[in-house]
Image (tube, helix red, strand yellow):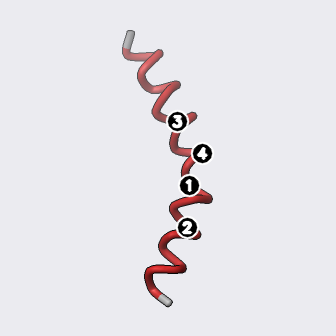
Amino acid sequence: LIGQILTVVYFLYYLLNPLVNKWWDNLLN
């Protein structure tokens, strides 16, 4: 169960990371 949760967390992290970076750039500029 914990392994599945970690897999989903890593997947969402790598999926959303570029979007968060773009959002941060827009927010700071």
List x then y, in percent, for residue 17. 56, 54
- Residue 17's tag is 1
- Residue 25's tag is none
Frontmost residue, 6 versus 27: 27
Q: Classify mark 2: helix, strand or loop.
A: helix
- Residue 21's tag is 2
* Mark nearer the N terminus (2 vs 3): 3
Q: Classify mark 4: helix, strand or loop.
A: helix
Distance from the alpha carbon under mark 3 to that under mark 1: 10 Å
Residue at the (51%, 61%) spot, across then down: 20
* Mark nearer the N terminus (4 vs 2): 4
Residue 11 drawn above or below residue 15: above
> Mark 3 = which residue?
10
- Residue 14's tag is 4
Q: Would you say the residues marked 4 and 1 are in contact, meaning their CB atoms lie under 8 Å apart? A: yes
Q: Classify mark 1: helix, strand or loop.
A: helix
* Mark nearer the N terminus (3 vs 1): 3
Q: Would you say the residues marked 2 and 1 are in contact, meaning their CB atoms lie under 8 Å apart? A: yes
* Furthest residue toward bottom: 29
The kind of residue on which mark 4 rests is Tyr
Q: Would you say the residues marked 4 and 3 are in contact, meaning their CB atoms lie under 8 Å apart? A: yes
Q: Classify mark 3: helix, strand or loop.
A: helix
Circle 4 Cα neighbour tier, 10 Å, few/some/many (<14 / 14–19 / ≥20): few
List x then y, in percent, for residue 15. 60, 44
Residue 29 drawn above or below residue 5: below
List x then y, in percent, for residue 26. 52, 80
Quarter placement of the N terminus: top left
Distance from the alpha carbon under mark 2 to that under mark 3: 16 Å
